Amino acid sequence: MAYVAVDADDHLEEGPEDLKFKSFLGADASTDQRTQSGASNLDRGYLTDHTTRKSPSGFWTVEYYQPYFDVDTSTVLKRCYTTLLPTSPSYLTILTPSADLYGPFWIPTTLVLALFLSSSLAASISSYLSAPGAAYEYDFGLLSLAATIVYIYTFAVPVLLWLALRYFGVGEWSVAEAIGVWGYSLFVWIPVSILCVIPVSILRWVLVGIAFCLSGYFLVANVYPILAMADAKATRLLIIVVGILHAALALVFKVSFFSYYVVHDIGPGADPVRRFL
């Protein structure tokens, strides 16, 4: 056994202050030890990784709108048919946890095509049944009319309502949520426009009434709670404006696209395709 002589001047009592430890495992190992529990929690969804989140981009960039289109097809379809079920428990929360603009874009676009194709098909069928030998020319002006009406109603109306709510101090509702409510409320008009090809006047009125009630109830149920947040009680009267605009939309659809029926010629030069309310 060997002994080492130690002088009293080595200040052993001060050794712990000068003592240093060095890790020979490397920086990666120490980083893994520190983040092992945190990484597992991130994987389980208990924590949110704020360090990897990018700063919000300007509204003029594509990155700004990308999160609103990050939605799968099953979610969009579920939100579509939920608008037809007023008794569904998720009827008032179909846009949770986040609103999307994918459905509110393709639903009115599909509706524009459905309105033009169904009205053109109904007009051609009525023309053939009224005068089998007469030639029929499609009115492509209906396509531009449908696009103008649908897109203004889908995007301009909710944006104006959102601006009005911001003016009255209601900031809990985003413009994406407003457009989402209006966009998904139009879904019921797609099957209705297809069924209105049937040349039965009373049936078309019934179908338009059903679509008006379902879409209108969806709008009122989702918009009125937001209006009720405003301090000014007069703000709640905006729901009347929403109802009037919705009724006007239904009437325009019925008059412009669902009013063809079969008649017989009653004189020379009579139009074989007539419209009525």
Image: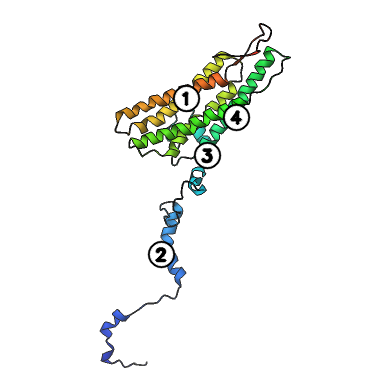
- Provide residue 236's location: percent of width, then percent of height: 34, 28
**Distance Cα–Cα, label 3 vs label 4:** 17 Å
**Distance Cα–Cα, label 2 vs label 3:** 41 Å
Q: Residues within 10 Å of mark 2 (few under 14, many from 20)?
A: few
- Provide residue 171's location: percent of width, then percent of height: 36, 39
> SS class of the residue under badge 2?
helix
Residue at the (44%, 33%) spot, across then down: 158
Residue at the (69%, 19%) spot, across then down: 136
- Provide residue 273's location: percent of width, then percent of height: 64, 14
Choose the circle earlier in sequence order: 2 or 1: 2
**Distance Cα–Cα, label 1 vs label 3:** 21 Å
Give the numbered dot on residue 34.
Answer: 2
Give the numbered dot on residue 102.
Answer: 3
Residue at the (49%, 45%) spot, across then down: 65
Choose the circle earlier in sequence order: 4 or 2: 2
For discs 3 and 4, the disc positioned in front in the rendered view: 4
